[in-house]
Amino acid sequence: MHLACGALAEHEPRVMSARSKLFASVLAFGAFLTLAGCDSGEYSFTPPADAPLYGSAVQSDYSLIDSAGNPVSSADFIGQFQMIYFGYAYCPNVCPFDVSRMVQGYEQFAEANPDLAEIVQPIFITVDPERDTPEVVGEFTANFSDELIGLTGSVDQVEAAADAFYFEFYKIDPVVEGNDYDLQHASIGYLIDPNGQPMALLPVDQSGDAVAAELERWVR
């Protein structure tokens, strides 16, 4: 995991570092009951005992809107795995590559596992709601895949979603005329299980192959 979209500068972080909260909070994992995914036909999901984010403080709740302006919440995806990436459409050089690797990993997994791919949903959540309107988010995600859902919302909604995931981001002071700005944020993805529980991080900063391998490990 590394910080993306802008050089490090003196700042007041909005929250603690994503790395420290993600990994320092991981607790011993207790026994999980076998739970069937809702609205998933005959598919039944058994949580694996070794998923690294189980038992951590990381949550996956959010209430946002999609590119058509329709309300979307984490509860809408119960019964599916979610691949979630936080970024922003105006990101100059990192987010497009991270999202591309996430989508490539999903497509590789889907080619090898077409049935399982039907219960995997790639999702892009903006951390720049001031500029990333539903229309902008829709245009951004359409550049990568018709399967990729783009979500935005109010500033409060986006911050609440990021807080649930212990995801850090902050605005870098404008460095050019016109008040344009970049956002500093971690370059990571999240895999959420069909019960709505965070399972593992996705190596979107590495390669599509690495993302596909992580899906092969957890999506069963």
Image (spheres, rainbow, N blue to C red):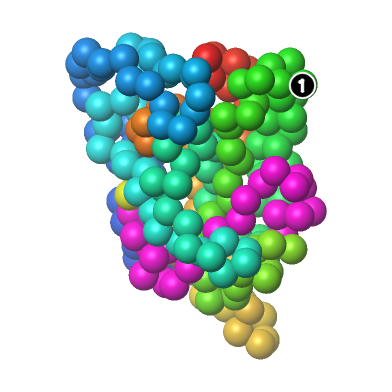
Q: Is residue 189 left or right of residue 12?
A: right
Residue 57 seen in render: yes
Identify residue type, mark 1. Answer: Glu
Residue highlighted by disc 1: 111
| Residue found 69% across the figure and 62% down from its top | 138
| Residue found 52% across the figure and 14% down from its top | 220
Could you tell me residue 110's position as x and y percent? 71, 24
Q: Choose top left, top right, bottom left or bottom right for residue 169.
A: bottom left
Q: Is residue 65 left or right of residue 57?
A: right
Q: Secondary structure at mark 1?
A: helix
Q: Is residue 70 magenta?
A: no
| Residue found 60% across the figure and 16% down from its top | 216
- Compared with 74, 20 (above or below) is above
Residue 105 seen in render: no
Q: Which range of residues does the magenta coloring cover?
A: 140-163
- Residue found at the very far bottom of the displayed protein: 178
Q: How many marks?
A: 1
Q: Between residue 6 and residue 77, name the one nearer to us.
A: 77
Q: Is residue 84 left or right of residue 28?
A: right
Could you tell me residue 190's position as x and y percent? 48, 37
- Compared with 78, 89 (above or below) is below
| Residue found 22% across the figure and 13% down from its top | 31
